[in-house]
Image (cartoon, grey):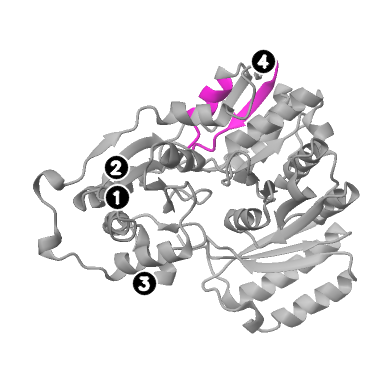
Amino acid sequence: MSDQLLFGTDGIRGKANRGAMTPEMAMRVGQALVLYGQRKKGVAVPKVVIGRDTRISGPMLEMALVSGICSMGGQAYFAGVLPTPAISYLTTVRGADFGVVISASHNPFEDNGIKIFGADGEKLGEAEEGWISQWVLSGKIKEGERLTGAVIGLSQKYPSAARRYQHFLLKFFRNSFHLKGMRILLDCANGAAYQVGPKLLERLGADLIVMGADPDGQNINEQCGSLHIERLAQKVAAEKADLGIALDGDGDRSLFVDERGHCLTGDHILAMMALDLDASRRLSNRTVVATVMSNFGFDIAMKEAGIGVVRVGVGDTQVRNEMRRGGHVLGGEQSGHTIFAEHSLNGDGLYTLLRVAELMKRRDQSLSQLASVIEPVPQVLENVPVVERRELNQICRLPELIRSVESELRGKGRVLVRYSGTELLARVMIEGENFSQIDRMAKEIANCIRQEVGGQRLS
């Protein structure tokens, strides 16, 4: 395993108890964090806040990580099962040197991952990840360097973690803010927000119906949450709810269903929020950051409103980096990450829910009315399991096929082919005026990739 394979686009991720996700590797990651804090930051006793989602492998990796931290003289704080954005915040408020989330987000339960935040609550940079990778994969601890006696590190629970996170979520809103009279369906994906999410909305007085809040270690993301929003859509319509929200496994992403049972994308939420911020002159640079996956209908709506759109590569890290670089206050992904800089530079599904609900109440409008600000153009997405990430321009016939499709679209659509950053998948996305046409095109490109590098999804 090379250092390039330890950290991916969103931390370390893989099948639990294999490769990079073994207890032995987790222990070494814990040791590396403490050593980095001591050697590079000059901290004698580095402090680490740790949270996780509900996967069956979570406690195994958590214990191993803590063992590594304590073995090098660090101090670990167990925050328990909480969303990823909670750990980012708690790292800063606790004055810790690092925060760690044990989660594989939207991946199946067999996978797990390790995301690391610095003292500022931001994900580690490439240089920091590189140092940790190198030490984990090749570093040695000499016998004389092993700590003994009173200098061995301690671990303890962080009992106020959930309460502090709830307070953080509500800081933006007035003390009088409430959700009384709103019927809300919340799908927690049997994941990290299954406790804190319902408690927060009940505290605000919502008429709440909860789904996906009975984790058993194996059902995270299983036919629930943002990956399977269709079940929520059916229930929203049946229950005559005002809105439904589906979180992903680690709670940093959210998708919505309006009162008619229609599923919205992250583009709808981003457009609503951009227009609202612009109306109150709080949209800095009159610009919003989106990714290459955002629907072209989003660009049309923003152009009509005089709002600029900066497109970046896929991933909330790319969105966050561009927001920081350009001084922008709003950005997000079609998949459901929405980032409000005035709150945090990390996506937060529960905070996004509160912002949407607050906008509905303040404007006295339904979610469908607010979401009508954009009219998405037809879009098709094909996911192709692959056995390797061969350069796309080296796949026989693929470049020629893409040029042919673009020519057929005649400038009234677009083609995007890329590899997933977290799974062995090739993603083919095509937009155009005619659904049947782009569906055929997407399948042609997907079949081309499948013939060259395709395979069964790795278990």
Name the residue located 44 percent from the left edge and 71 percent from the top edge: 4
Residue of label 2: 76
Under mark 2, the amino acid is Ala
Q: Earlier in the sequence, mark 1 or mark 3?
A: 3
**Residue 180 disc label:** 4
Q: In which quarter of the image is the N terminus?
A: bottom left
In the rendered structure, are the residues bearing label 1 and label 4 in contact, judged by CB atoms less than 8 Å apart? no
CB-based contact (under 8 Å), mark 2 and mark 1: yes
Q: Name the residue under label 3.
A: 1
Name the front one of labels 2 and 4.
2
Of the numbered discs 1 and 4, the one sitting upstream in the chain is: 1
Badge 3 marks a residue whose secondary structure is loop
Secondary structure state at the residue bearing disc 2: strand
Labels 1 & 3 near each other (Cβ < 8 A): no
User: Of 441 and 139, which appears nearest the observer?
Assistant: 139
Is 295 placed left or right of 189 in the picture? right
Assign a secondary structure to mark 4. Answer: loop
Which sits in the foreground, 390 or 304? 304
Disc 2 or 4, which lies upstream in sequence? 2
